[in-house]
Image (spheres, rainbow, N blue to C red):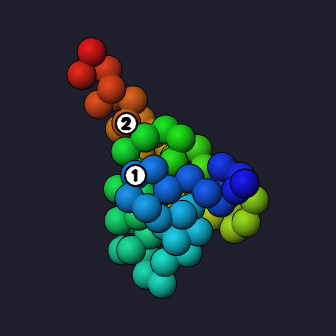
C-alpha cells in the first residue's frame, strides 16, 4: 500500500513527485494549478517537506490551498 505523499493522484493521475520535480518551473506551476482537492495538495506539501523544502513551491502550494478553500466556500 502506498503512503499519501507518494501515492495521491486524485486530481490528474500525477504523483506529488511528478508534479513538483518537473523539468521546468512552468510545468511545476501547471502541476500545482491542476490540484483540485485538499488530499492531493496535502500529499504534495508532505512530499516537498520531506524532499526539497523549496520555499517558492511551498508558498505556491499554500496559495493553491487558499484558492481551493475559496472555491469550496463559493459552492456552498
Res. 58 visible in picture:
no
Residue 51 is situated, as x and y percent measured from the top left of the image, at 73, 66
Q: Residues within 10 Å of mark 1 (few under 14, many from 20)?
A: some
In the displayed structure, would residue 17 be above or below residue 2? below
Query: Circle 2 sits in a helix, a strand or a loop, which is it?
Result: helix
> At 44% from the left edge and 69% from the top edge, which residue is drawn?
28
User: Nearer the observer, disc 2 or disc 1?
Assistant: 1
Q: Which residue is depicted at the point 56% across and 53% down?
A: 8
Give the residue at x 37% y 36%.
68
Instruction: Assess disc 2: are there few (<14), some (14-19) or many (≥20) residues with their C-alpha within 10 Å of its C-alpha.
Output: some
- Classify the position of the C terminus by image quarter: top left
Residue of label 2: 68
Left or right placement of residue 23 versus residue 16 in this view? left
Q: CA distance from mark 2 to mark 1?
A: 12 Å
Q: Which of the pair 2/25 is nearer the observer?
A: 2
Residue lying furthest bottom in this view?
A: 23
Q: Is residue 63 above or below residue 53?
A: above
Depth check: give the residue in front, 11 or 55: 11
Outermost residue toward the top in this view: 76
Give the side of residue 45 with respect to residue 14, left or right.
right
Which residue in the structure is indicated by mark 1? 11
Asked which secondary structure carries label 1, the reply is loop
Task: Identify the residue at the far right of this view.
Answer: 50
Residue 23 in view of the camera: yes
Q: Which quadrant would the N terminus be assigned to in this image?
A: bottom right
Question: Most extreme residue toward the front, as rendered?
Answer: 1
Choose top left, top right, bottom left or bottom right for residue 34.
Answer: bottom left
- The spot of residue 61 in percent (x, y) is 50, 50
Residue 37 lies, in percent from the top left, at 43, 40
The x, y position of residue 50, in whole percent, is: 75, 59
Amino acid at each position: 500500500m502506498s503512503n499519501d505523499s507518494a501515492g495521491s493522484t486524485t486530481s490528474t493521475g500525477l504523483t506529488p513527485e511528478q508534479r513538483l520535480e518537473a523539468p521546468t518551473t512552468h510545468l511545476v506551476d501547471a502541476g500545482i494549478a491542476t490540484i483540485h482537492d485538499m488530499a492531493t495538495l496535502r500529499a504534495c506539501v508532505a512530499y516537498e517537506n520531506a524532499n526539497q523544502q523549496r520555499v517558492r513551491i511551498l508558498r505556491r502550494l499554500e496559495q493553491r490551498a487558499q484558492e481551493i478553500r475559496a472555491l469550496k466556500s463559493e459552492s456552498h
